[in-house]
């Protein structure tokens, strides 16, 4: 196979021709006018020069360009062709006419591929007497950069044609995904339709484009925001593609906003205005990072995951190809179905059901595959199996649940009726769970949270109330509490706390030993130990050292901090809506997992060294608290707390 015929010298045709020539094929480009061909060759020349200067091609630009011929005579060009790629305007009649002429002029065994985005391959193939040789070969713009093609099997495409097309794709340096049925939008555009539609609907509901795109870029890690992509592709193109897919039976309600935007000439980048204002073509809008938690990213992707499930269930594409397509075609940092496994399939289904209820649209009905997965407890990383199988382990250390979820561990304090307060079993269970996570090579970071409305309400008052002599308290600290503190002070993996509710006393203080603290909007913090005749040993040492003078006030008053105040003080890193807490934690696992494990270890050792410089102060405060135990103030404090009364201090 030597000669490739590319028909259509426009946006796609010239790029496809360039890719084929770079791969060593002789390429003939056909168009209807010489001026279109001249323009295309100029563009290819310019692009090749750029690739040459960046050393992205092995030969020099002139040698590659020499392999490209142009003509307006389709019949003549067809006679020499070994492989045909049609990339003319998206018009069924024009395409069918071309395929008929190809059929009349091409040799036996030549493959006729079409780059159509919306026209059924089977329909185009009906213009020929050899529909078995007709196939979809869908490139992405620009083909020189996006190294993926969708290979689409028409109803009558032969296996041999599919195999030869796969081989051809490889020879031009393209990775491919196979779309087994000629469904509208194939794979990528079908999924994109759902993502674009949801993002546009969110704008219709009053979210700002920046809020949506901030979540997409900075949390999901996509290279561009969804509405940025819509502006880049053209609002009119999205309208056109949506309507073409609707015409072919895809269940989607079109957007009124898009129609209005087109009427106003807000077509996106090309007209200077779309969802954003654009100062010239290729101008990148600035998306602020601090808006990233205004929307739930699961909502943006749930309809797309639903669509992907439909493709999978109907045998149209494999899970691997669905994921590969979104990674290579759209620059997703990981596959869509892998993301679904991160979110939790139950969460995806809940989101879809909520949207179906809110909108009354059955396009949100969860696909039977998703429903089945939830019923079978195939929930993703959190249960060890979802679209993929993950390393999973669950161990209960008393009231502490340890779960290994593939590359991270989730530790959950589970005494919700006692607000997860720290009794002996809780301290010991936490220490065992953290140690287990430290030893597991798969675990890159540890998340910790509490069940119910508290993260952890501090030391268990009934335990403290039972201390009569200072040795009771001392023994408890030394044998039960301090081993966990020591483990955390030596910990070499990142610890990420998800503060779901109250974090009081010891529950707040533990957070001073964690590396990243994410708080739900429902969280509240306080170190009220002084109010019960005790004192906060970690807060009044490491806390004051790390957070500064302002923190003394909270130790001395027991005043509560809401999550925003805690964030301002530097105690909390980020405050997120309650339903996004776990998700936000998982996103941070992803972030820290991007660092080299040895770098993370080195950073942690250094941070630990800083924490350990306060060991002496911590020792002192431990002695102080132990000395408080036999005092009458402590006895009074305990009593008052149990009776919910104001204590009467004797003191001094
Ligand atoms: P375009 O409008 O830039 O180029 C189409 C070219 O076809 C023009 O140069 C036109 O003169 C030529 N043409 C029209 N009738 C012809 C004929 N009878 N014989 C030979 N040439 C003829 O269009 P674009 O964007 O390159 O799209 C081409 C095809 O690729 C369409 O089917 C489109 O759906 C598909 N596609 C487009 C993508 C894009 O991002 N633009 C991405 C993937 C697929």
Image (tube, rainbow, N blue to C red):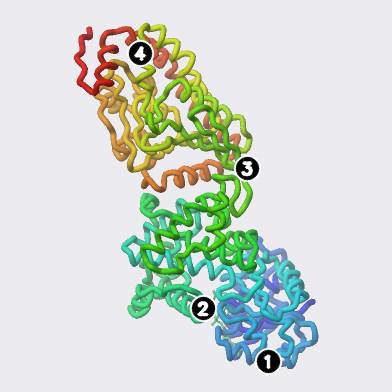
Residue 431 lies, in percent from the top left, at 52, 25
Q: Earlier in the sequence, mark 3 or mark 4?
A: 3
Q: Disc 2 to disc 1, how far (Cα)?
A: 27 Å
Foreground disc of the pair 1, 4: 4
Q: Which residue is mark 3?
A: 391
Gap in Å between the C-alphas at discs 2 and 4? Answer: 72 Å
Spatial CA span between label 1 and label 4: 91 Å
Which residue is nearer to you in this view: 7 or 339? Answer: 339
Task: Check disc 2 and report the residue beneath it.
Answer: 249
**Left or right, residue 39 beside residue 129:** left
For marks 2 and 3, give the CA distance.
Answer: 40 Å
Question: Residue sitting at 58 percent across and 82 percent down?
Answer: 119
> First in sequence: mark 1 or mark 3?
1
Is 459 or 519 nearer to us in this picture?
459
- Confirm or deny contact between disc 2 and disc 3 (CB under 8 A): no
Q: Which residue is mark 4?
A: 625
Q: Quadrant of residue 204 in the image?
A: bottom left
Classify mark 1: helix, strand or loop.
helix
Residue located at (39% from left, 67% from top): 200
Q: Position of residue 31 (x, y in %)?
A: 62, 87
For the residue pair 370 and 77, the one nearer the viewer reads as 370
Q: Residue 564 in the image: state x and y as whole percent.
A: 30, 40
Mark 2 element type = loop
Contact between marks 2 and 1 (CB within 8 A): the answer is no
249 left or right of 201 in image: right
């Amino acid at each position: 196979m030597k000669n490739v015929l590319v028909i259509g010298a426009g946006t796609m045709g010239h790029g496809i021709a360039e890719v084929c020539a770079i791969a060593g094929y002789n390429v003939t480009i056909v168009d209807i006018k010489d001026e279109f061909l001249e323009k295309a060759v100029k563009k290819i020349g310019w692009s090749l020069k750029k690739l040459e200067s960046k050393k992205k091609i092995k030969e020099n630009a002139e040698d590659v360009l020499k392999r490209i011929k142009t003509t307006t005579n389709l019949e003549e060009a067809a006679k020499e062709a070994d492989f045909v790629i049609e990339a003319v305007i998206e018009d069924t009649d024009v395409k069918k006419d071309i395929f008929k002429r190809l059929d009349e002029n091409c040799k036996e065994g030549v493959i006729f591929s079409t780059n159509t985005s919306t026209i059924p391959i089977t329909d185009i193939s009906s213009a020929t007497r050899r529909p078995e040789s007709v196939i979809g070969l869908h490139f992405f713009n620009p083909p020189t950069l996006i190294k993926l093609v969708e290979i689409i099997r028409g109803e009558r495409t032969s296996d041999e044609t599919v195999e030869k097309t796969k081989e051809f794709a490889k020879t031009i340096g393209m990775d491919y995904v196979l779309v087994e049925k000629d469904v509208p939008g194939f794979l990528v555009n079908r999924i994109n339709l759902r993502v674009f539609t949801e993002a546009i609907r969110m704008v219709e509901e009053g979210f700002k484009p920046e809020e949506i795109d901030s979540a997409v870029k900075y949390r999901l890690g996509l290279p561009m925001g969804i509405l940025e992509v819509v502006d880049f592709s053209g609002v009119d193109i999205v309208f056109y593609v949506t309507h073409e897919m609707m015409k072919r039976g895809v269940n989607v309600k079109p957007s009124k906003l898009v129609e209005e935007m087109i009427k106003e000439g807000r077509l996106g980048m090309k007209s200077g205005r779309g969802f954003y204002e654009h100062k010239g073509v290729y101008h990148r809008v600035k998306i602020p990072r601090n808006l990233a938690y205004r929307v739930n990213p699961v909502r943006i992707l749930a309809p797309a995951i639903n669509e992907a499930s439909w493709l999978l269930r109907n045998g149209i594409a494999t899970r691997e190809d669905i994921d590969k397509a979104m990674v290579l075609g759209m620059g997703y940092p990981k596959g869509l179905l892998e993301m679904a496994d991160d979110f939790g399939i139950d969460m995806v289904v809940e989101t879809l059901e909520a949207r179906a209820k809110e909108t009354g649209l059955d396009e949100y009905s969860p696909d039977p595959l998703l429903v089945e997965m939830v019923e079978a407890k195939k929930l993703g990383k959190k249960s060890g199996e979802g679209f993929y199988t993950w390393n999973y382990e669950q161990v209960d250390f008393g009231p502490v649940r340890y779960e290994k979820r593939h590359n991270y561990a989730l530790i959950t304090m589970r005494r919700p009726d006692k607000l997860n307060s720290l009794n002996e079993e809780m301290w010991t269970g936490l220490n065992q769970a953290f140690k287990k996570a430290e030893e597991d090579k798969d675990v890159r970071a540890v998340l910790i949270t509490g069940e119910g409305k508290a993260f952890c309400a501090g030391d268990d008052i009934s335990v403290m109330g039972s201390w009569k002599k200072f040795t009771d308290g001392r023994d408890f600290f030394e044998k039960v509490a301090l081993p966990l503190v020591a483990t955390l002070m030596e910990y070499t993996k990142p610890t990420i706390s998800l503060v779901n509710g109250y974090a009081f006393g010891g529950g707040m203080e533990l957070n001073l030993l964690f590396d990243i603290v994410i708080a739900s909007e429902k969280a509240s913090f306080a170190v009220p130990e002084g109010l019960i005749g005790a004192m906060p040993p970690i807060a009044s040492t490491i806390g004051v050292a790390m957070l500064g003078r302002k923190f003394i006030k909270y130790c001395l008053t027991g005043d509560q901090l809401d999550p925003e105040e805690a964030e301002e003080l530097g105690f909390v890193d980020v405050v997120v809506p309650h339903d996004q807490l776990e998700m936000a934690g998982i996103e941070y696992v992803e972030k820290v997992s991007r660092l080299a494990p040895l770098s993370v270890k080195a950073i942690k050792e250094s941070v630990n060294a800083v924490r350990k410089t306060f060991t002496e102060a911590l020792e002192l405060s431990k002695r102080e608290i132990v000395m408080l135990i036999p005092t009458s103030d402590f006895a009074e404090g305990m009593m008052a707390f149990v009776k919910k009364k104001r204590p009467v201090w004797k003191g001094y």
